[in-house]
Amino acid sequence: MWSQEAALAAAYDRVVVPAVSGSADQGPHWSCCLPTAGETTISLSVVRTAGPWIGARARASLGAPPRVTADPGRERYAIGSGSGTPQLHGEPLIWLGCPAWLEVCAPAHEERAEVTLRLPPWQELSRLVAEADLWDAADLLALELSSDLGVVDDGATVGFPGAEDPPGQAGRLLQGHLGIIVTSAAVRALDTSRTPYWELPRSGLHLVLR
């Protein structure tokens, strides 16, 4: 099995068909530039609960074919004990014509799980999908998984927050990531110069860029 790094590199070298969210002449619409060179990641912190597996719920929330399909050209990766749900699982997808990985990291000793959508770096991503589609995907994931905290970054993930409540963590996370996805209470806890860049209406969360 390929390593995750090799699989990601291979995915970004694939020839993909641009999504229909922008015209062929102008390309998809974006109002910001994300300085991601390796990959663009949206990573959400999720409280683990009994019920359907988080990965299956996350996959379903992104949509049905043709919006999202499995990518048979790339292999899944999984790390675990050999029984039960894996502690790390990555599923290769084609999302709106764009190669992606949906990754779930759920170590046995952690109360929370980490769900990450891994996409090409911004320069490539912005030619394939519209900005609104990216934040809509984040909104759908957050709604389905009842997430209250997330980050946008160049490969880095949200990690595993401790007992500190999300409003108190927002400022620290914003210092270490390109952006954060947080509740209204967390936005109010930030410095007054930090205002939401994008509203995620379904989940009620807000995107704040650094």
Image (tube, rainbow, N blue to C red):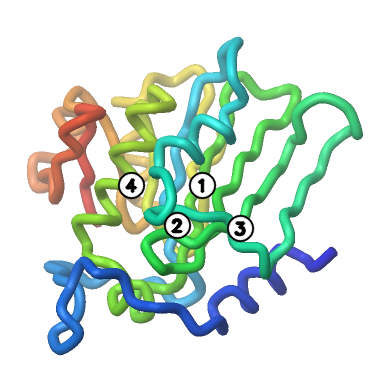
Which of pointers 2 and 3 indicates the residue nearer the eye? 3
Q: Which mark is residue 41?
A: 2
For the residues labelled 2 and 1, the Cα–Cα distance comes to 7 Å
Badge 3 or badge 4: first in the primary sequence: 3
Q: Which mark is residue 137?
A: 4
For the residues labelled 2 and 3, the Cα–Cα distance comes to 14 Å
Q: Amino acid at mark 3?
A: Pro
In this rendering, position of residue 94 left or right of residue 186: right
Disc 1 vs disc 3: Cβ atoms closer than 8 Å? no
For the residues labelled 4 and 2, the Cα–Cα distance comes to 12 Å
At horizontal 59% and vertical 47% (from top left) the residue drawn is 103
Q: Residue 104 location in percent, x, y?
A: 61, 40
> Quadrant of the rendered structure where residue 160 is?
top right
Q: Nearer the viewer, residue 15 or 209?
A: 15
Secondary element type, mark 2 = strand
Q: Is residue 191 above or below residue 29?
A: above
The crowd level at tag 4 (other Cα within 10 Å; few <14, some 14-19, many 20+) is some
Disc 3 vs disc 4: Cβ atoms closer than 8 Å? no
For the residues labelled 1 and 3, the Cα–Cα distance comes to 12 Å
Which of pointers 4 and 2 indicates the residue nearer the eye? 4
Disc 2 vs disc 1: Cβ atoms closer than 8 Å? yes
In this rendering, position of residue 59 left or right of residue 188: right
Q: Amino acid at mark 1?
A: Thr
For the residues labelled 1 and 4, the Cα–Cα distance comes to 11 Å
Provide the residue designation for mark 1: 116
Q: Nearer the viewer, residue 48 or 133?
A: 133
